[in-house]
Image: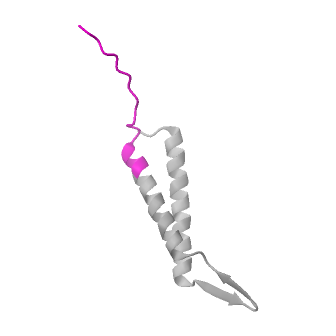
Amino acid sequence: MLTKMQEARLERYRKRLSMYYEAEEAVLLNQEYSIGTRSLKRADLSTIRAAIRELEGQIELLENSGGKNKAFRLIPRDI
């Protein structure tokens, strides 16, 4: 089970990943375009794809951890 902080982080990662997928699609459809004398060049596709891979990894890490990372303190005893 995820903590509230982990759930919030996971939601932020998913939202950002969705935006990166949209950016990737926009770049794939049209990398650069002009309107009159002005031109616009979209972000570099390799940068977008690197961010997608990073976010997918972070999401997978959070989903698979399931809040299992806990700290334990052991006290050695001599019986």
Q: Is residue 59 magenta?
A: no
**Residue lying at 29% horizontally and 11% vertically, measured from the top left:** 77
Q: Name the image quarter holding the C terminus.
A: top left
On screen, residue 65 above or below 44? above
Residue 76 appears left or right of 46: left
Magenta stretch prevailing secondary structure: loop
On screen, residue 5 above or below 13? above
Q: At which x and y percent is residue 56?
A: 44, 59
On screen, residue 38 above or below 8? below
Tell me where the magenta segment starts and ends, as one range: 61-79
Residue 70 appears left or right of 45: left
Q: Residue furthest top?
A: 79
Q: At which x and y percent is residue 59?
A: 44, 53
Q: At which x and y percent is residue 18?
A: 52, 64
Please tell me which residue lies in front, 78 or 8: 78
Q: Residue furthest bottom?
A: 36
The image quadrant that residue 71 belongs to is: top left
Please tell me which residue lies in front, 21 or 75: 75
**Residue lying at 69% horizontally and 89% vertically, measured from the top left:** 34
**Residue lying at 62% horizontally and 85% vertically, measured from the top left:** 32
According to the image, what is the colour scheme of the structure? one colour
**Residue lying at 56% horizontally and 65% vertically, measured from the top left:** 19
Please tell me which residue lies in front, 16 or 44: 44
Q: Name the image quarter holding the N terminus.
A: top left
Q: At which x and y percent is residue 17?
A: 51, 62
Q: Is residue 65 magenta?
A: yes
